[in-house]
Image (tube, helix red, strand yellow):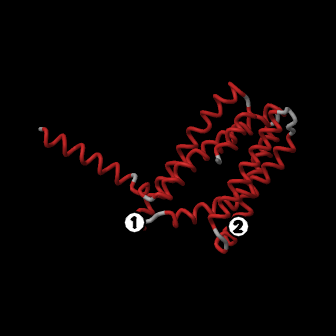
Amino acid sequence: MNQSVNQINSNNKSGLQFILRALHSRNYRLYFGGQGISLIGTWIQRIAQSWLVYRLTDSVFLLGLVGFSTQTPTFLAGPFAGVIVDQRNRYHILIATQVLAAIQAMILAVLVLTDNVQVWHIVVLGVFLGLVNGFDMPSRQSLLVEMIENREDLSNAIALNSTMVNGARLIGPTIAGIMIAAVGEGICFLVNALSFL
């Protein structure tokens, strides 16, 4: 009986190690932790931004316009950004995109906290963030391959990455709802800016 319990515990431990094996790569482990926090911040900002636009305008059209202004530049810049990322240092591009996204979130935070925000600010900053994301995504995806020390763990890293993205998509909006009700949208943008550190 004791032997079978020990065997089950051993199997569970080795099973968990197998599921998380990509985290044995130090660089991927650092990336995974940092990216998880940053993505939660990103989702907090997305929800707060939508709420802010609707609160300011009461317009479903403007709410859609802001979403469109953020996503369209990412879509249009993607193919060109991918070519540029392939020809340059991916790490430097990723650092630059993270700094620019943090600056964008900080500007939004200041505008909201000082009560100077207008819808056109949100649209312009949305276009800017969309362009930044156009470079961020291909650099992040291609850098992922370089972070994994053991090539056999690459598929596991991709699976863990997908889990992290979906986890942030679940956690971020929940936190955003609580924060908007408690402290307002400006603090949400500030939290996102700080999540890049």
Q: Residue sitting at 58 percent across and 44 percent down?
A: 37
Marks counted in the figure total: 2
Distance between mark 2 and mark 1 Cα atoms: 28 Å
Amino acid at the residue labelled 2: Ala
Query: 166 or 37, which is in the foreground?
Result: 37
Q: Residue sitting at 57 percent across and 64 percent down?
A: 143
Q: Residue sitting at 81 percent across and 35 percent down?
A: 112
Query: x and y percent of residue 180 in the render?
Result: 70, 29
| 36 relative position to 182: left or right | left
Q: Residue sitting at 67 percent across and 42 percent down?
A: 194
| 172 relative position to 78: left or right | left
- Above/below status of 186 relative to 129: above
Q: In which quarter of the image is the N terminus?
A: top left
- Element carrying mark 1: helix
Going from N to C along the chain, the mark reached first, 2 or 1, is: 2
Identify the image quadrant of residue 110: top right
Query: x and y percent of residue 190 in the render?
Result: 72, 38
- Badge 1, how many Cα within 10 Å: few under 14, some, many 20+? few
- Element carrying mark 2: helix
- Above/below status of 136 relative to 165: below
The residue wearing badge 1 is 152
Amino acid at the residue labelled 1: Glu
Identify the image quadrant of residue 182: top right
- Badge 2, how many Cα within 10 Å: few under 14, some, many 20+? many
Query: x and y percent of residue 96 in the render?
Result: 70, 59
| 152 relative position to 60: left or right | left
Numbered mark located on residue 95 in the image = none
User: Disc 2 vs disc 1: Cβ atoms closer than 8 Å?
Assistant: no
The residue wearing badge 2 is 81
- In the displayed image of the protein, which residue is found farthest to the left? 1
Query: x and y percent of residue 119 in the render?
Result: 85, 40
